[in-house]
């Protein structure tokens, strides 16, 4: 599977198979995460692999996501915020930490997809609670959790806006979606489907309103 195909087929999950992910496979996923770009090459990212059932249950409650308990392996991405701050300054440290985590998460999820593994990315939880539960030292912050599993029912990514509606040539507003462009360009067809559904929904709504007045 090519990288492009992996991106297009990236999936999440709701249910997991009762199948353990080998340490060797997780190692490949972690290595992909470690190789993600790091602002200023600070390399302030660390990982906690959570396999123990009780700890997965605890983490699941802390991040308020039941999938963490069900998945056989989750990874907590921990940023050394103090280290990043020393290199880039306080004003940019959090932004750069978030960027490093996002790049790492995407690398990990794409590598997992190549292995036939679905994944989910969780953020926005109480960082202090998770830090305390997993003995994360001061100055370091858990910013994301990624859970991995094999599943028989992968959840496909939600529909995106078509590329012709968000991509411009040479200047903002010069869109690719015109009669002079290749309609097989990735995103054009998807955009047509999205807006087609929206138009149908609006038409159906208008019809219902008309019937109400008849």
Image (tube, helix red, strand yellow):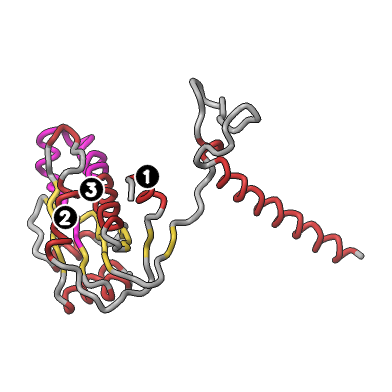
Find residue 22 and report its horizontal and vertical position in percent.
15, 67
Q: Which residue shows up at 33% across the image and 51% down it?
A: 1
Disc on the earlier residue, 1 or 3: 1
Eye-nearest disc, 3 or 2: 2
> Image height check: is 100 above or below 13?
above
Q: Which secondary structure lies at badge 1?
A: helix
Q: Which secondary structure lies at badge 2?
A: helix
Magenta range: 75-100
Side of 119 relative to 20 (left or right): right
Side of 119 relative to 162 (left or right): left
Q: Which residue shows up at 55% across the image and 36% down it?
A: 164
Residue closest to the far front: 1
Q: Which residue is mark 3?
A: 104
Eye-nearest disc, 1 or 3: 1
Q: Residues within 10 Å of mark 3 (few under 14, many from 20)?
A: many
Instruction: Check contact, mark 1 vs mark 3: CB within 8 A.
Output: no
What is the magenta segment's predominant secondary structure? Answer: helix
* Separation (CA) of disc 3 from disc 2: 13 Å
Q: Which residue is mark 2?
A: 28
Q: Which residue is mark 1?
A: 4
Residue 61 appears in the picture as rendered: no
* Separation (CA) of disc 1 from disc 3: 17 Å
Front-most of 196 and 136?
196
Side of 212 relative to 26 (left or right): right
């Amino acid at each position: 599977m090519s990288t492009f195909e992996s991106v297009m087929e990236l999936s999440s999950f709701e249910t997991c198979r009762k199948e353990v992910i080998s340490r060797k496979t997780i190692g490949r996923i972690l290595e992909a995460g470690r190789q993600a770009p790091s602002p200023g090459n600070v390399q302030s990212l660390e990982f906690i692999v959570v396999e123990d059932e009780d700890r997965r249950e605890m983490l699941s409650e802390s991040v308020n996501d039941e999938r963490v308990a069900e998945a056989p392996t989750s990874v907590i991405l921990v940023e050394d915020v103090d280290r990043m701050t020393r290199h880039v300054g306080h004003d940019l440290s959090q932004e750069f930490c978030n960027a490093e985590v996002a790049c790492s998460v995407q690398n990990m999820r794409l590598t997992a997809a190549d292995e036939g593994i679905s994944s989910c990315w969780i953020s926005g939880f109480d960082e202090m609670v998770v830090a305390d539960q997993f003995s994360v030292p001061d100055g370091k912050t858990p910013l994301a959790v990624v859970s991995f599993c094999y599943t028989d029912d992968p959840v496909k990514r939600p529909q995106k806006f078509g590329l012709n509606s968000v991509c411009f040539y040479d200047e903002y507003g010069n869109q690719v979606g015109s009669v002079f462009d290749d309609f097989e360009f990735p995103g054009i067809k998807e955009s047509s489907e999205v807006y087609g559904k929206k138009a149908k929904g609006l038409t159906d709504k208008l019809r219902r309103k008309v019937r109400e007045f008849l």
